[in-house]
Image: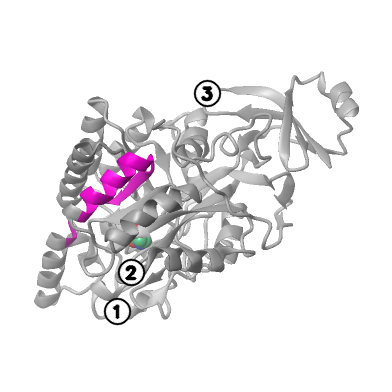
Amino acid sequence: MTKLIKNGTVVSATGRHAAEVLVDGTTIVALLQPGSDTALAAESGAEEIIDATGKYVIPGGIDSHTHMELPFGGTAASDTFETGSRAAAWGGTTTIIDFAVQTYGQNVRDSLEAWFAKAEGECAVDYGFHMILGDINEASLKEMDTLVGEGISSFKLFMAYPGVFYSDDGQILRAMQVAANNGSLISMHAENGIAIDVLAEQAASRGDTGPVFHGLSRPSLLEGEATFRAIQLALVAGAPVYFVHLSSSEALEAVAAAKDKGHNVFAETCPQYLYLNLEDHLGAPGFAGAGYVCSAPLRTKHHSHQTDLWKGLRTNDLSIVATDHCPFCMKDQKDLGVDDFRAIPNGIGGVEHRMDLIYQGVVMGEMTLERWVETCSTTPARMFGIYPQKGVIAPGSDADIVLYDPQATSTISVETHHMNMDYSAYEGIEIAGKVDTVMSKGKVIISDNAYHGRKGDGSYLKRGLSTYLH
Ligand code: URP
Ligand code: ZN
Ligand code: ZN
């Protein structure tokens, strides 16, 4: 079945122009000059015309950091692969890269198989996996090579959460040495977890047990320190490094300094760090702040963190915006920590809102339209080895296409979102612009404010190596 998207403005990471996009089956087959379309489309036998008048035609969003069903603190993230990937589609995201998890004492292979089983046949959009290594030993180091061959070409390590996911500097160095050798990418959760645990314990013993003390016991200096340390370890190993959920000026400074020296150091930030803060959200009255507990934590508004992050996105010191989508409901999940912030499961859901929230950066003049596409789609595809299958509107690429209406508006709310959460961290934020139509591999799965897809539409993406390194 062929489809022709007409009258829209095609936006890529490098420019925008009026063009018609011809799709055959699951694939984009041509970009046509407006005007030449009718004859060519007739020749090619386009069976369906999609009118994109007044809309931007962009490559589907790629959220390279999600945690569907992640077990955490005695519960599990509330979105399944089915509900979370469908919410992603509603928000114009047509690819997710989730994290399979090896925890301490588990074997990497068994852990990965468990994640394949959770996702298979469930997803609305295509999905890939990173592998979290929570127990670095001889066997898991060896497994890294095998996994690269199977499309898992990035590995997340934690400098936080001692006793859960934590790796010490020696383990990190060893994993980085393997990555340097096999071409994979190490993703880092950079917070000094040993120091944080001391501060958290001291806060709790003083009786400071509310959600805001989660943030206050994770100072940005300890993100900056861990980021700097991880960069030194990466340089010693000769490996690239990618920082996930970067939240603070201190961490950004360490990344920018390394990039200025020409090192292969990359970072993402997330919408929560651009829009939410410690005082108004994590410090909200009563227990409401629990809805904003995530790590790295939201930062104080009495500092230039948010301004610096927007600037970092413009200068490419920050390459990607991902969500770190890790939703928990307030009821029966976040409230596990009602007496002690240390028991609040860490995470915020937002997979549905990333494209809209970062588009507000365009509206506010923080970034260009092209940079929006680059940070939310093209760079994630390149960074994580799925370009040009994904991340670009070009002949031969998957027909993952979003029609974005800059004239429409909406308001984010728990009443209207599609994530499996009983609150929204972004409640009440007004959005200029709206996802109008979403096509995943040639199939229209969102249009006219309705979902037309099915679970199992999405398939597993076997990823290659990052094209930023090779
Ligand atoms: O709070 C967060 N970020 N939860 C998800 C796990 C992680 O560290 O990414
Ligand atoms: Zn993390
Ligand atoms: Zn995460």
Q: What residue type is labelled 1?
A: Val
Q: Mark 3 points at which residue?
A: 14
Q: What residue type is labelled 2?
A: Ala
Can residue 190 be seen here? no
Decide if residue 432 is on the left or right side of residue 4: left
Decide if residue 23 is on the left or right side of residue 251: right
Secondary element type, mark 3: loop
Q: Residue 105, image x and y in percent?
A: 30, 72
Secondary element type, mark 2: helix
Q: Name the residue under label 2.
A: 290
Instruction: Determine if the C-beta at disc 2 is less than 8 A from ligand 1.
Output: no
Q: What is the CA distance from the residue labelled 1 to the residue labelled 2? A: 8 Å
Q: What is the CA distance from the residue labelled 3 to the residue labelled 2? A: 40 Å
Q: Residue 123, image x and y in percent?
A: 61, 60
In the depicted structure, whether residue 286 falls above or below residue 191: below
Image quarter hosting the C terminus: top left
Residue span colored magenta: 171-193
Q: What is the CA distance from the residue labelled 1 to the residue labelled 3? A: 48 Å
Q: Which of marks 1 and 3 is nearer the N terminus?
A: 3
Q: Which amino acid does label 3 sit on?
A: Thr
Q: Mark 1 packing: few (<14 Cα in 10 Å), some, or many (20+)? A: some
Q: Residue 316, image x and y in percent?
A: 36, 30
The label number, if any, that marks residue 338 in the structure image: 1
Image quarter hosting the N terminus: top right
Q: Which of marks 3 and 2 is nearer the N terminus?
A: 3
Q: Residue 165, image x and y in percent?
A: 28, 64
Query: Between 63 and 311, which is closer to the camera in this rendering?
Result: 63
Residue lying at 74% horizontally and 51% vertically, measured from the top left: 448
Decide if residue 82 is on the left or right side of residue 428: right
In the depicted structure, whether residue 392 falls above or below residue 463: above
Q: Earlier in the sequence, mark 1 or mark 2?
A: 2
